[in-house]
Image (cartoon, rainbow, N blue to C red):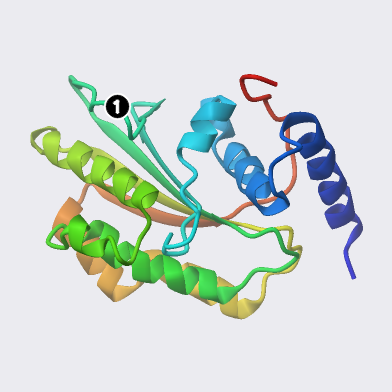
Amino acid sequence: MSSQNTILLSAMIAQLKNDIAPEMKNDDYFEVFSNEQILKEYDLSYDEIIEGTVGNGGDGGIDGFYIIVNDILLNADEELPKLRGKVKIDLFITQCKNIEAFDESVIQKFQSSAEDIFSLERDLEKLQPVYNSDLLKHVALFRNLYLSNISRHPELTIQYYYSSKGDAIHPNVNRKVESLGGRPRIQSLANNLFGNKYQISSNHFMKSDCPQQKSPSGY
């Protein structure tokens, strides 16, 4: 049975969707809504949220892939900016499920795709049968950004977010979340690539304090 908070959240999302993107599928809009809330501190536009949405089959369990460098979102279709001084990279990887539960398989997919994303020896062209072109384009941008600024010793934070309408989190899911940053193989990959200049964290998206969503251009 749905909780009162879940009923209120579902009603709010339905109203926003009807006002902002009535033609969009419910699951797709939930991704947009969730990713905006996750990234709300950056005050991104609707189009910027859409640009980082990569979930469309062959996504490796990833719905959103956002690269923030010095508090500015990078666009995968644009050239890398020329950076000076300190380089701070925040990488947000999200999965958004329009259901009233948290599934531990999502965390398992995060773990699996991380090995492909952060292993530089894995040729992205050879991963085309596995992942969709949007995700690979964003992974390529991330790799190019980091390597092109390697002499500046970039400060990197990798944040995983799993969003759903669920109120309760099963202990098995919590154990998977806790292991995401500390799992030996992922930890080893991060150490090899990023040395001491990285941090991995994992989060559940909480449903409180959801502001009014921005309208897309054209609406």
Compared to residue 127, the image places residue 151 above or below, namely: above
**Residue 89: x %, y % from top left:** 31, 37
Task: Work out whether residue 200 or residue 166 is closer to the camera in this orientation and state it.
Answer: 166
Compared to residue 108, the image places residue 126 above or below, namely: above
Q: Residue at x 53, y 34 (%)?
A: 49
**Residue 136: x %, y % from top left:** 31, 51
**Residue 55: x %, y % from top left:** 50, 53
Asked if one can make out residue 123 in the rendered structure from this viewpoint, the answer is yes
Q: Which image quadrant for residue 60?
A: bottom left
Q: Which image quadrant for residue 38?
A: top right
Q: Residue furthest left?
A: 151
Q: Secondary structure at mark 1?
A: loop
Task: Work out whether residue 104 or residue 124 is closer to the camera in this orientation and state it.
Answer: 124
Q: Residue furthest bottom?
A: 172
Residue 23 as seen in the image, left or right of residue 61 = right
**Residue 71: x %, y % from top left:** 40, 26
Q: Amino acid at mark 1?
A: Glu
Residue 88 as seen in the image, left or right of residue 105 = left
Q: Within 10 Å of the Cα at label 1, are there few (<14), some (14-19), or many (20+) other Cα atoms?
A: few
For the C terminus, the quadrant is top right
Task: Work out whether residue 48 or residue 57 is closer to the camera in this orientation and state it.
Answer: 57
Asked if one can make out residue 195 in the rendered structure from this viewpoint, the answer is no
Q: Which residue is mark 1?
A: 78
Q: Residue at x 22, y 26 (%)?
A: 86
Compared to residue 209, the image places residue 176 above or below, namely: below
